[in-house]
Image (spheres, rainbow, N blue to C red):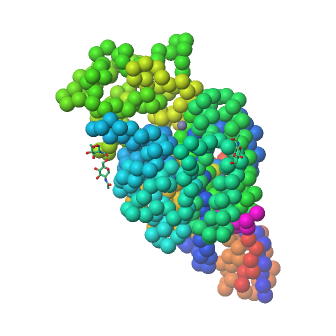
Amino acid sequence: MLLTVPLLLLLVSPSLGAPLSGSIARPRNKLLLISFDGFRWDYDRDVDTPNLDGMALDGIKATYVTPPFLTITSPAHFTLLTGRYIENHGVIHNMWFNITTQEKKQYYMTQFVDEYWDNGSLPIWITAQRQGLKAGSLHFPGTAATYQGQRVQVREVEPRFYDYSNETEWRMSIDTVLGSWFSEQDLDFVSLYFGEPDTTGHKYGPESAERREMVKQVDRTVGYIRTAAQKHGLTDRLNIIITADHGMTTVLRNGPVKEIILSQIPGFSFRDIKFQLADYGPTAMMLPKEGMLDKVYSALKGGHPNLHVYKKEDMPGRLHYSNNPRILPLILIADLGYVINGLFPVQYSKGEHGFDNQAMDMKTFFRAAGPDFHKNLVVGPFETVSVYPLMCHLLGITPETNDGSLEDTRHMLITSEDTDISEVAPSRGPRKKLLLISLYGFRWDYDRDADTPNLDVMALCQVKAIFVNIASPAHITLLPVFKKDAN
Ligand SMILES: *[C@@H]1O[C@H](CO)[C@@H](O)[C@H](O)[C@H]1NC(C)=O
Ligand SMILES: *[C@@H]1O[C@H](CO)[C@@H](O)[C@H](O)[C@H]1NC(C)=O
Ligand SMILES: *[C@@H]1O[C@H](CO)[C@@H](O)[C@H](O)[C@H]1NC(C)=O
Ligand SMILES: [Zn+2]
């Protein structure tokens, strides 16, 4: 007799933690990592975002995620690609610089300095390629560089003067990635970058109508991506992760705000400095001349109530921005909303980032959907170093040494391991959820009760269902339920 158990929800307790036999080895699904630069974690709160909301219903939404410090574009994107803190991967700034020649390269030109990016940490593309997968990248920071002799095989690097905001261009990029790269060329992993809403957030400020309009454009784009995935028959075998590098905050000016202008700080002189990176938002770095370190440090420290000055070795450990030879001996960090000017004020952005990653305005967003993710699950915050081990796990590749942890994100996934309660580690953040596991055709008493023809599903549930409330019932999600013949 074929006993059909259409829907059997069993809430698993630790005592039922044994791995289940018959868990199906899943075929490897494709993975698309998307970054919308400067998308602050709460940008969907004051804008109608039907497509992002729809994606959350179909997948995972994190309350927010914490980027690495410095909260700026290239360093934070390289953390997504490597799972390493910035001091460990070495891409310590958007700008390449040479302390001897005083040469500085801006964001775009730095993309082509191989030695800057290739400093001991391999981005996920190269690791995937070495393990037999096909990878691609479109406009993602780091795409142009060569790592230990290899580059991401399929790539598109934007031209020197590129309009990062053009929605038509965005759609062309999406058609390339989904139509050509995933469908025709059968790539396994692609990273895709959009330069907004960062630019708009800088120019008009994060609380502006212009930023809200740009978030609508992002939302339309998310809709376009998911429709394109469907059109190309990828929905059932493509996981999509959408996140970003950092948030954005309003720059404080005028009125009671005393601007930070280093040249006006008593006792401080640029003549004591051999090399400096200032006028770049809320942080600055300095190399004082021989023997001048303590003099410069003493002058700057306490020089402005909203300026914090650290010797490199005294940087707070939680920032993970100290232990790298490229980081200069003095690091200056402004309070939220303040920017650091050198000789005189030259920064006119209304929005800025780069601040301490503890500030809520620096947090960014995280969404994921696809065949390997639970549906309609809101998860607590985690650090973006942990996106990398999640991606490696999804792709079935062995990760390089990294600073993230799969334990931060594993609970988002539908896997056979989900049935092993010991795998659901206590969360680091205030993550609260209830784990529900669907066991179809789990006829534990098959041998005992062979002569009981009217065994019904409800009775089985009453006997076997055990509740385990891992934290709080605030977030309950139902796994997709399968029908299966018990035989
Ligand atoms: C900086 O320039 C000097 C002099 O040209 C050179 O010797 C040194 O290797 C350069 N450093 C970096 C990091 O490129
Ligand atoms: C990283 O870069 C520094 C110089 O900036 C260099 O001294 C070091 O050897 C590089 N490490 C690797 C592994 O490439
Ligand atoms: C946006 O890009 C498209 C395609 O490249 C181009 O035809 C169009 O002129 C651009 N729009 C603007 C406002 O630059
Ligand atoms: Zn920016």
Q: Residue placed at 69% from the left, 58% from the top? A: 175
As drawn, which residue projects farthest toward the top? 255
Determine whether, in the image, residue 28 is placed left or right of residue 276.
right
Quarter of the image that includes the N terminus: bottom right
Q: Is residue 349 magenta?
A: no
Closer to the camera, 155 or 246?
A: 155
Closer to the camera, 3 or 199?
A: 199
Estimate the x, y position of residue 297 in percent, counting from the top left. Answer: 28, 25
Closer to the camera, 272 or 113?
A: 113
- Quadrant in the rendering for residue 162: top right
Estimate the x, y position of residue 441 in percent, counting from the top left. Answer: 71, 77
Determine whether, in the image, residue 72 is placed left or right of residue 342.
right
Quarter of the image that includes the C terminus: bottom right
Residue 1 to residue 135: above or below? below
Q: Which residues are magenta?
A: 231-238
As drawn, which residue projects farthest toward the left? 291
Estimate the x, y position of residue 399 in percent, counting from the top left. Answer: 45, 63
